[in-house]
Image: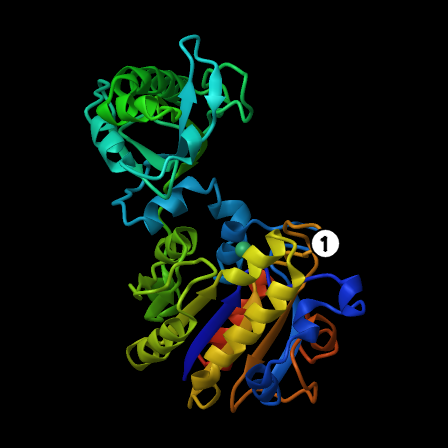
Amino acid sequence: MKALLVIFDGLGDRPVKQLGYKTPLQVAEKPNLDKLSVTGIKGIMDTIAPGVRPGSAPAHLAIFGYDPYKYYTGRGIFEALGMGLDVREGDVVFRFNFATVDEEMRVVDRRAGRIKRYTEDLAEALNTIEIPGVELIFKEAVEHRGVLVLRGEGLSWKVSDVDPGKTGFKVKMCKPLDGSLEALRTAEIVNKVVAESYKVLKDHWVNKDRISRGLPPANIILPRGASISTKVKGFKERYKLRAYCVAGGTLYKGVAKFVGMEVLNVPGATGTYGTDYDAKVHAAVRALKDGDFVYLHFKPTDLAGEDGDFRRKVDIIQRIDKALEPIISLEDTLVVITGDHSTPCSIKTHSADPVPIMICGEEVRRDGVKGFDEISAARGGLSRIRGLHLMPIILDLMNLTEKYGA
Ligand code: ZN
């Protein structure tokens, strides 16, 4: 028995007035999900806990069976892993923005005009910075974003952000957030890094060129969201499952790597509206031949929720449903469909509304609930579960759990 876990990011929603007080998932025509729903059990899931608005990374950790309150320190580590950086145990990882400051270190543009090109050249220059006793790795990401890794002894992730969060304010000093020597030392290092970044970047040819074209120079980096890399028992060790991930966004690839999944490179999988849905589904089905567990992630449902575009959310659900056709006929495979949190179009952000979930397969009880949406799923036989309950339930349905007691 194998398992396919399909996550529609931000799937859950609230009633939309213009849709007759139905949710996008209720309104969407989804013949494949409807067909699948007949063969399984449905319910709703609080991925972290009732009333907690989950971030995508902690929600995914919980769904994979890793308590987010224990394993989540910040987003940076997952971004770094998802970008393919060699992150080691104990590394302290920050996300940063390339930004624009004036000579008094006042932030003029937090995103350096959303710089799009040549950030790899800027990162290369940053990688020449040397601070005794610590190894530094700078890596550019999409547009103005990047990741900074601090490697060495005596570091801590309990330090404050440098990014003031608004323009017109001076770059903040990084401060220790607890009384430890490690946090004090890390804060000092970060402050040196920020000062050095200005020295290295201000006269860089990329910035001279930008200034000559009237664009804001990317003349500093503003680190934030310190997190620490910890080692966990991955899927293989913990569940005895060979697991694969098919996702477009770096954050999701990173969480998958963190829990020991092998991340597949699927051309066209972008984590944006333009992602290649069919290529992803085909890659997931192929991965099931070799793997025991495949995690397939779709981001655009969340993007439409954050844009407040309920019609687009309906369209995307329909598009994914169409792409999912090959999974309807899978044999000896448990198919799980759910979301990592709700992203209601009315509030354009994550909410704590539980997400619908269905678990389908030959051996799964059929609860008689047809269709798949927030309202009908709540009437299903799975009732209301937490994210951390999901992996034990999947493992049991795969007959991989052991009896408790005699
Ligand atoms: Zn999410």
Sort mark 1 into few (<14), some (14-19) or many (20+) by Cα contacts within 10 Å.
some
Disc 1: residue Cβ within 8 A of ligand 1's nearest atom: no
Q: Position of residue 157 (x, y in %)?
A: 42, 31
Q: Secondary structure at mark 1?
A: loop
Q: Position of residue 265 (x, y in %)?
A: 29, 63
Q: Foreground: 282 or 272? A: 272
For the N terminus, the image quarter is: bottom left
Q: Is residue 402 above or below residue 345?
A: below
Say what amino acid the circle numbered 1 marks.
Answer: Ser
Q: Is residue 206 above or below residue 273?
A: above
Q: Position of residue 188 (x, y in %)?
A: 37, 16
Which quadrant of the frame does ligand 1 lie within?
bottom right
Q: Foreground: 82 or 29? A: 29
Find residue 303 and report its image quarter: bottom right
Q: Which residue is mark 1?
A: 346
216 on left or right of 267: right
Residue 194 shows in the view: yes
Residue sitting at x 41%, y 22% = 100
Residue 171 shows in the view: no
Find residue 244 and report its image quarter: bottom left
Q: Position of residue 12 (x, y in %)?
A: 65, 63
Q: Foreground: 303 or 113? A: 113
Residue sitting at x 38%, y 24% = 214
